[in-house]
Image (spheres, rainbow, N blue to C red):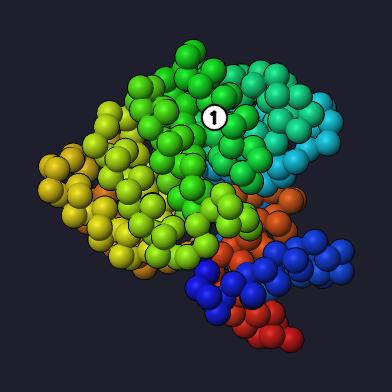
Amino acid sequence: MASLLERPLRAAILAAADSPFVQRTVSRYGMQLGARRFVAGESTDEFLAVAREVNARGFAVACGILGEGVADRAQAIAAADHYCALLRTFAERGIDANVAFKLTHVGLDIDPELAFENAARIAQTARECGNTMRLDMEQSRYVDATLAIYRRLRARFDNVGYVLQSYLLRSMDDLVSTLDLQPNVRFVKGAYLEPPAIAFSEKREVDANYLALVERALASPGYTAIATHDPAIIAHAERIIAERSIPLRGRFEFQMLYGISPALADALVARGYRVRLAVPFGDYWFPYLMRRLAERPANLAFFLRGAFSKR
């Protein structure tokens, strides 16, 4: 979450994401100007090359195909097919990667049952490949539907996970409601603009809730993915892990976004932790890039430096 001074800039970046002119310009030049720092590329081959390189540096990968909010059943089925194909490729090539996807990418806006069927097909393929999959979380209006589908999947599969966002007031209750499932849950701060009635507005509140969620999850059976670039939160998590003698493998991992805080990610690997980088790819990378710029305005400075240095 942004500080008080950063909030107007964050809102402006997200508003620019809806501008046809900005989208045309960034989509045309963005990869050359610096978007490739955050996105593996547009094709599967480009992604696989990055995934191999990331594995060679000691990181696992969370693969995401960019393109949520599909408009018809054929697109939703094709997206699920693509994830299934990737899982098979990971198994065949020995790539340490799983998949994470938004339910709107596999049909949630069209028909929740279609989204469930596609997610179940991906989960089945992941199980056959000895792998896992995760349901990403979207705007607050999708939380109930996402958790409902997660629970249905968890009744059939033990290799599925989900995500909670610490800026939502409801997230602790949502976590507690799933603890009986021994969940594989990833914690993030949240990347969407939500009203104060349902979301914390101050960074300190979001951070405090994040730490409370991590502590509660680590105190319970299951698997915890600590997805953050915040050194203070990482240090706090490390203290909890040490105090409770939690083994470095098998109960938790750290997760970070590809291209952000690489030195910190390298340091965590050097300290013996399992670290997974979220590596997205695909044609629909513009909204993803804008969310990354809005989350941390320093990323905008990097992008603009790339833009002007190419002129």
The residue depicted at 54 percent of the width and 53 percent of the height is 199
Mark 1: secondary structure: helix
Q: Is residue 141 left or right of residue 275?
A: right
Res. 89 in view: no
Q: Which residue is mark 1?
A: 147
Q: Position of residue 295 (x, y in %)?
A: 56, 64
Q: Is residue 210 left or right of residue 192?
A: left
Number of marks drawn: 1
Q: Residue furthest top?
A: 156
As drawn, 82 above or below 281 = above
The residue depicted at 26 percent of the width and 53 percent of the height is 237
Q: Position of residue 176 (x, y in %)?
A: 38, 32
Res. 194 in view: yes
Q: Quadrant of the C terminus?
A: bottom right
Q: Is residue 70 left or right of residue 190?
A: right
In this rendered view, identify the residue nearer to me: 263 or 150: 150
> Mark 1 belongs to which amino acid?
Leu
Q: Is residue 204 left or right of residue 259?
A: left
In this rendered view, identify the residue nearer to me: 253 or 280: 253
Q: Residue furthest front?
A: 197
The residue depicted at 69 percent of the width and 85 percent of the height is 308
The residue depicted at 59 percent of the width and 32 percent of the height is 144
As drawn, 152 above or below 184 = above
In this rendered view, identify the residue nearer to me: 20 or 305: 20
Q: Position of residue 63 (x, y in %)?
A: 55, 42
Mark 1 nearby-residue class (10 Å; few <14, some 14–19, many ≥20) = some
